[in-house]
Amino acid sequence: MADVDTKTPLLEVKNLVKHFPITRGITKRVIGAVKAVDDISFTIEQGKTFALVGESGCGKTTASRCILRGVEPTSGEINFLNRDGEIVDVTEVPRAPLRELRRDMQMVFQDPFGSLNPRMSLLDIVGEPLLVHGMVDVQERADRVAELMRLVGLRPEYMRRFPHAFSGGERQRIGIARALALNPRLIIADEPVSALDVSVQAQVINLLQDLQEQLGLTYVFVAHDLSVVRHISDTIAVMYVGKIVESGTVADIFTNPKHPYTSALLQSVPIPDPRARKARFVLEGEVANPANPPSGCYFHPRCPNKVEKCVTEAPQLEEIESNHFVSCHRAKELDLQGLVASSK
Amino acid sequence: MADDQEQSSAQLLEEEEILAVAGQYRLMWWRFRRHKVAVAAGFILLFFYILFPFAEFVGFGDPTFVATKMQLLPPQPLELFEDGKFSPHIVAVKGGRDPETWQVVYLPTKTHHKVGFFTSSWEYRFLGFFKTNKHLIGFSNPDHDYTKYPSLYILGSDNLGRDQWSRLMLASRISLSIGLIGVALSLGIGIIIGGVSGYYGGIIDTIIQRVIEIMNAIPGLPLWMGLSAAVPKEWSIIQVYLGITVILSVFGWTGMGRVVRGRYLAMREEDFVMAARLSGSSEARIMFRHMLPSFYSHIIATVSLAIPGMIIGETALSFLGLGLRPPAVSYGIMLVQAQQPAVVALHPWLMFVAIPVIIVILAFNFLGDGVRDAADPYGN
Amino acid sequence: MVDKLLSVENLKTYFPTDEGVVKAVDGVTFDIEPGKTLGIVGESGCGKSTVGRSLLQIIDHPGKIIDGQVHFQSESAGGLVDLAQEKPGSPLMRQVRGGEIALVFQEPMTSFSPVHTVGNQVVEAIQLHMDVSKKIAMARAEELFELVGIPNPRSRLNEYAYQLSGGLRQRAMIAMALSADPKLLIADEPTTALDVTTQAQILELLKTLQKQNNMAILMITHNLGVIAEMADDVVVMYLGKGVEVGNIDDIFHDPQHPYTQGLLRSIPSIYTEGEGRLPSIKGTIPHPFNRPSGCTFRTRCPDYIQGECNTAIPQLQTVGNTKRTVSCFKVHPRKEEVAANG
């Protein structure tokens, strides 16, 4: 691996858009589009964890999959610093080199059951990326798989086993081992712990953090559990109906939110402490339909602070403090509640 | 006590280890085993198919030999004892006419023909290669004159005096193999067309699906009749046989195609397929290495339910005189004789062929049921 | 002492299967007082859902209650009845189920039939327990929809379940459950399938309804945050057993059982950025056919005592003079027990 300037961001996403066409009838006539990802931009520093948070249907999963072209983006730029120190636009890379590029970016899935082929043994699952990238020798592959299994805390003796012999947490470790097989630098983790039990969730979070330290990994962490996000991430982007409404450092977002949606999201999280019970603010209404979003600011029908301008004019993402971006007309004037531990 | 516990837990661990390394077929087999009826059906079918190469070997008499003096002979019993001693034989019969009704009746004579194992009679090619005249059961007298008394007639004879049992053996071979080959053909077509349809989707998918719908909308029997009528008269038995198989599978693949397409569509969105794509696997590898094995089991189940359809199809065509033609022998051809109402009253043994047809069809259905239940070992 | 609405004692529900017996619920004891909320918390496979289903005798095949009592203060029976003794199809059980005790499921999509409008299904539920005409039932359904905060209740009644969003479906489900004015609402992971803002709405709704109707709630969930928000008392379950029972503040601020302690420690705090590793419980939940002898938690327990925990099964015992009970040999050493008995 070439020496790479660690100051350069590993990934820079610019104006990423993904529309899914809505078709009708047997002729598949296009009658509209679901704007799953609607013009988002963000940067991720090397070795850091960037979290995409939001509620279901906000486009966070689609956005994350666009990064490694698991989903083909409609438009936008995805500038990735490859291992030779060159910046490449992932969206422009043709098929064959894309295969090479994907050695650098891998994915960990949410569902520990659906993401492992039940008909393949662990050796085949973890060894698959090695095999298709030219490690043909069986023994060499088995050695590397054993090494990867030790790395994620699984006993290498189990490599002949099939996924059905493992629990959810162990399967998630297998998924992580597979993602690490080609020595990637960027891991897209799509809700990697949300399907796990609390006691196991902590183990996997620890594993992810240890691996980051050990291997210098950069994470894109897609999640809806805000306490996990706060624990693991450095920077956060909050998405609502395909757009980023606020992004910044963990501290900024959690203690000093500037978008009413971010604040509402924080207030909605049930706190595992009965003494923290309070009459809380509850956000009314439902998430807007991305196929037919409202006018102006997409959040205005639910926003407790809306003014007339919000209905007619869509706000832009602006940097209101250093590295703290908000897309709200009233970002500067509102005094919103963050999450501060109640004094015990 | 503690030892006991340790032992049992060690045993438990061992069992767990076996389960842990068990691949999909082992898991399927474990589940299938629990389905007793299906296992029994499997053995019955296995028996039928094992008889395949031995059809002539287990035949009693030359199935093509026309014996005018033995027409429509009822089934003859095999006598096991003679004068209190074990000596299997049959009592020879002689045809004559009832002086009052002028019907042909067969009366026993004094002649006994001894029966034994591994006898020599009519010559055939075993597996199509080795010329031999050995048979499992036949007349043990090496000088027996087969032209005079051609067979045992355990199941009687047909209107040309041919041995029904021997013909039934040949018929099983033809009819059951048509089922297998026909399904194999439609499976091939179905996997390729269905796979293309499901994996690529879009316009290709739409066109293929519409074609399948149109094909399914055409009533089967008239179409088969039309196609069979197009089979040239001068084709040899083998050509007609292959022609009928192709006709059956040309319309049989649509069901298979739908199954395969549905599975591909469902699986295209699975995370493990995405993972394989991100690993750098090629599209062909994803289709055949990652996706196809996931529905082998469904294919096996569909196949075992499709074979009886093929067998019935052939039987029906031949029964209507549109399928295979004599001198070929199949279930359908044998049943042609049973078309006349008189048969029911006077020669009921000619309908015996229906029994193996029913057994085979039922067995395939039970087997298919069991396989389908076992097909998804990851169901729970 | 307050009269108990429901009192469950040593409930055991087993599932005999070809491979062996799954002891889904293996001794659970708790009380619910009128108008209060009891939370059952535990991880997947701990049997918490089976507890709820056992109370109503709607256990999936081949599960069966094999031991224990479920004493319920029933109006239709005019007093205390043991629901565990009732047959699933008995007239009393039918009265109680959906009438005095109602159930809200995790997945509102599959709880509604896709071929009938939600209105018709709510009307049917109302008519099952009240002898009223369809017209009155429809009016009552509209009222209920309004009560649970569904906008435009009249037009929503004529919609099908798939036309409603997840949050609205769950509200409709709650409306249906409320149709017979139940004394106890069993809510089985009612917000797990929902987003966090919708979850907050539903939790607030449940609290409001509880106050209005003086209804008791049995809240079954794996989410400790939801429990902390809602419950008055808590049962912590592990592998079919209630390992710790007590009031909410005791459980969260002075947990005694090592499992409860581990569970609480392993949630990352939302108040602070992550510093270092999260404390976690080692190992994984054992397979139901392969339970450890003695205390079922011992294989993962940081306080495991060789020779104690693996040889006997700890029983729930009160802690000091409180109402709290814990089953752990670290809290109640066995020698002491012998000394106390002798």
Image: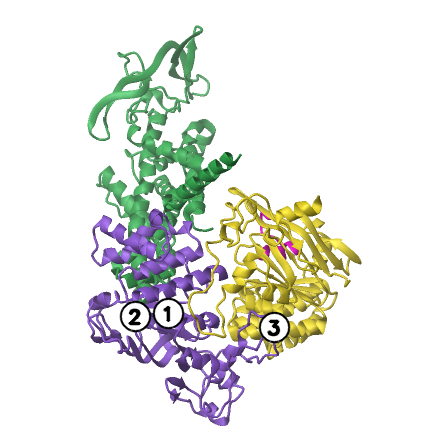
Chain colours: A purple, B green, C yellow
Q: Is residue B291 visible?
A: no
Task: Quickly name the residue at label 3.
Answer: A275
| Front residue of this view, candidates B255 and A207 | A207
Quarter where residue B84 is shown: top left
| Front residue of this view, candidates A108 and A343 | A343
In this view, B342 is above or below C81: above
Q: Residues within 10 Å of mark 2 (few under 14, many from 20)?
A: some
Residue stretch rendered in magenta on the structure: C48-65
> Which quadrant, please, contains the C terminus of chain C?
top right
Task: Quickly name the residue at label 2.
Answer: A69
Q: Which tag is nearer the camera, tag 2 or tag 1?
A: 2
Whole-number angstrom distance, CA of label 3 to CA of label 2: 46 Å
Which chain is home to disc 2? A
Residues at discs 3 and 2 both on one chain: yes
In this view, B258 is above or below B30: below
Checking the image for residue B37, the label placed there is none
Residues at discs 3 and 1 both on one chain: yes
Query: The residue tagged with tag 1: helix, strand or loop?
Result: loop
Which chain is home to disc 1? A
